[in-house]
Image (spheres, grey):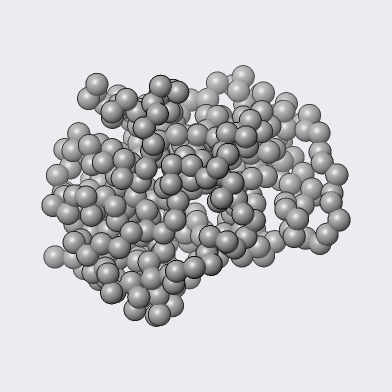
Amino acid sequence: MNEIERFSVRIPQADLDDLRERLRRTRWARQLPGAGWDRGVPVAYLRELAEHWADGFDWRAVEARLNAFDHYVTDVDGQRVHFIHQRSPEPHAVPLIMTHSWPNSIVEFLDVIGPLSDPRAHGLDPALAFHVVAPSLPGFGFSYFPGPTDTEPWSVERVARTWAVLMERLGHDRYGAHGNDAGALVTPQLAALFPDRVIGSHITGGLGIPDGGWWEQGSGYGPYLSARPQTLGHGFADSPVAQLAYLVERFHEFDGWTGAETLPRDLVLATASVYWLTNSGATSSWTYYDGAAGLPIDQDVVPTGVSHGGPQEFRTLAEQKNDIRHWAGYESPSHMVAMAVPGSAVASLREFFGGLE
């Protein structure tokens, strides 16, 4: 059960043909009264995006980009865990486990794994490089759930312990950790549980945010997913447009309801494709149903670095309960930082871990 097996992303052509056929046969909703995004994703916007997904988007190109990295699967406590393990050619590289966000996938890190693992090839100082481990969260993408017999909740703590087993199995005794959104919950939890192994905890934000208000804002998706995620899952499994609409709404809501695309269109469709092709739209919602949504925990046993962390008053609050060593003032048009501004995500990681003893 401790075996690690090589893995490649290989989607059968029949599955891609079925996706395109479903997209072309979509029964479109009528547009409700109201302006812009006030009542949800506009029909015209979604229709144009779905048409591009069917006839302009190239999944095979995404598949090739994914398979340019080294993929593996293993079993931890009955859970299939898929992960990229991209070893650096540099002899003194630092192991780094990176946890993606919700609702996202390892697609989030496509543009940062290369510069982090092979900085020399990307014009960066090779004195600091990383052996990158990028798992798919349980129930997300290629980390399939084992089935209905596993009734133990997938809490943040359980994921963190699973990551610790994974890193030990890979031979990484000391390592850094990074995460965004859901990954920003797992990362400090991993540090708090295993301070003898984690050398630094780097997240994209979430620390120092004043209590109150953040949960109630927006569309109310959080409380619903915390109560009845299976109901939405039926639509996600049957209709790629339902899955796409939900993802697009989350990305727009996270980024301020601007109505403007803040992420590369084909990266959004790549994540939508991963969800659809692995039927993980419903299973990814455990983050809410199992109480794994919220804000990162405070911990002061491992140094913390934050990129895109917000104003100085957030840092002041965060420093009361965390050992803040790095707080970057970078800006990003999107909550999905590594997808929107991969260069600054890489820079912050290098600054933080490069400054640790």
- 99 or 91, nearer to the observer: 99
Q: Please report the residue visible at 39 percent of the width from the left and 36 percent of the height from the top.
A: 153
Q: Which quadrant holds the C terminus?
A: bottom left
Q: Residue furthest front?
A: 227
Question: Is 155 rendered above or below residue 24?
Answer: below
Question: Is 18 rendered above or below residue 272?
Answer: above
Could one spot residue 257 in this view of the protein? yes
Question: Is 152 rendered above or below residue 318?
Answer: above
- 344 or 101, nearer to the observer: 101
Q: Please report the residue visible at 66 percent of the width from the left and 33 percent of the height from the top.
A: 235
Please state if 154 lies on the left or on the right of 334 as rendered: left
Q: How many marks?
A: 0
Q: Which quadrant holds the N terminus?
A: top left
Please state if 55 lies on the left or on the right of 64 as rendered: right
Q: Please report the residue visible at 63 percent of the width from the left and 49 percent of the height from the top.
A: 248
Could one spot residue 354 in this view of the protein? no
Q: Position of residue 338 (x, y in %)?
A: 45, 56
Q: Please report the residue visible at 45 percent of the width from the left and 23 percent of the height from the top.
A: 148
Q: Position of residue 35 (x, y in %)?
A: 81, 62
Q: Position of residue 123 (x, y in %)?
A: 34, 60
Q: Position of residue 87 (x, y in %)?
A: 26, 42
